[in-house]
Amino acid sequence: MNSLYNRDIISIGDLSKDEIQAVLSQAAEYEQRLARGERHALGQVLQNRLLATVFYEPSTRTRLSFESAMNRLGGRVLSVAEAKTSSSAAKGETIYDSGRMLEGYADVIVQRHPAIGSARALADAAGVPVINAGDGAGEHPTQALLDLYTIQREGAGGMQGAQLRALDGLHVAMIGDLKNGRTVHSLSKALSHWKVDLTYVAPPELAMPRDVVSFVTGRGATVHESDKLSDALQSADIVYVTRIQQERFNTVEEYMKYKGVYVVNAAVVAQAKPGVAIMHPLPRVDEIATDVDQLPNAAYFRQARNGVFVRMALLSMVLGAV
Ligand code: NCD
């Protein structure tokens, strides 16, 4: 049985390099099988299995790609899209109580919640595996897996190639609200299994949390920090752009200080290394101009699509079907 069977996926830091690689190769297998039209066979993999998705924060991609993944594998989905207002949390139910209840309803639970540590709290209560789909400004481990998958798939020229790109030796720049953005926390930890150079570009008040920096440097990654976009461009193979996380600011005025601070447009991409892949977990607000969309370097919509293959892999591994 694969070592992710029956495991909670809370922090990407809990997964070994081998486990991450196993998810990525299972995702590649599912992508190829879908491309070959093996829909019927894939639809047998998780038959009679149930996934509950419980989202207390907005989501388009994460929830729908989990649900798409489960459906493609023949499983079924129970879903609370606006758990904050439409679930019993609005009546004061605790995460512990919802965990005790949900374990009776589903074989695996995917939760997004605004509080750091909420996924761990649910996992401690529920006797079925819990997958963290974002716990406030904490982590987003499944996004990190699909980001790694995308980095591997984006070959020279920014196009998806047949060859997988090696992760050792890569220079990855991350730009934006690195303090509050959970995707960059998880992606940094995931990348630190390989020999990577990381450049963090953020206003000083929104810098990468120190615990993430020490985690990755402790594993041997090189970190450069700056508040200038130009520093992210010089030699980066991947430019990973993120949104200023408006919902984590106390006031609109505070948010407005940073909104629009970095904008990557086609002219900016032209200054970067040829073949640079421009990634973004989405949704974007104004930090990537639409004139980038037409460039072969724009990887973000392919990145979103990759979420389905990676989540198919993860669900089938956690549920012990592979
Ligand atoms: C991200 C998230 O929710 O953290 N979105 C996503 O899952 N693709 C990024 C964001 O909201 O900025």
Image: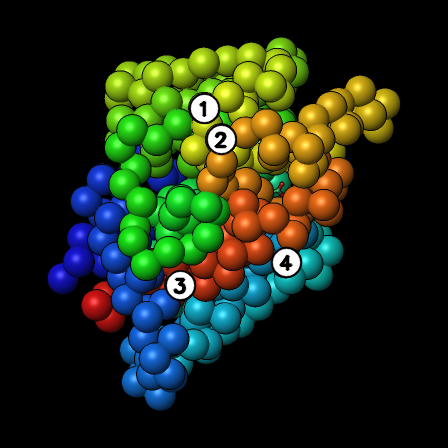
Task: Tell me: is circle 4 under 8 Å from ligand 1.
Answer: yes
Say left or right for 200 vs 169: right
Residues at marks 2 and 1 touching, judged by CB atoms closer than 8 Å: yes
Residue 114: x percent and y percent? 61, 40
Q: Position of residue 51 (x, y in %)?
A: 44, 68
Q: Amino acid at mark 1?
A: Ser
The kind of residue on which mark 3 rests is Phe
Residue 138 located left or right of residue 188: right
Q: How many marks?
A: 4
How far across and down, in percent of the image, does residue 207 sit? 57, 17
Which residue is disc 2 drawn over? 273
Amino acid carrying label 4: it is: Thr
Label drawn at residue 30: none
As measured in the structure, the alpha-carbon distance from the residue carrying label 3 to the one carrying label 4 is 16 Å
Judging by the rendered image, the residue that carries numbered circle 4 is 60
* Towards the viewer: 56 or 155: 155
Q: Quadrant of the C terminus?
A: bottom left
Residue plotted at (37% across, 22% down): 197
**Structural distance between the alpha carbons of marks 2 and 4:** 31 Å
* Location of ligand 1 given as a quarter of the image: top right
Q: Where 32 sits versus 153, above or below?
A: below
Report how far apart the C-alphas of labels 2 and 1 lie in the structure: 6 Å
Q: Which mark is residue 309?
A: 3
Cβ–Cβ under 8 Å for marks 3 and 4:
no
Q: Residues within 10 Å of mark 2 (few under 14, many from 20)?
A: some
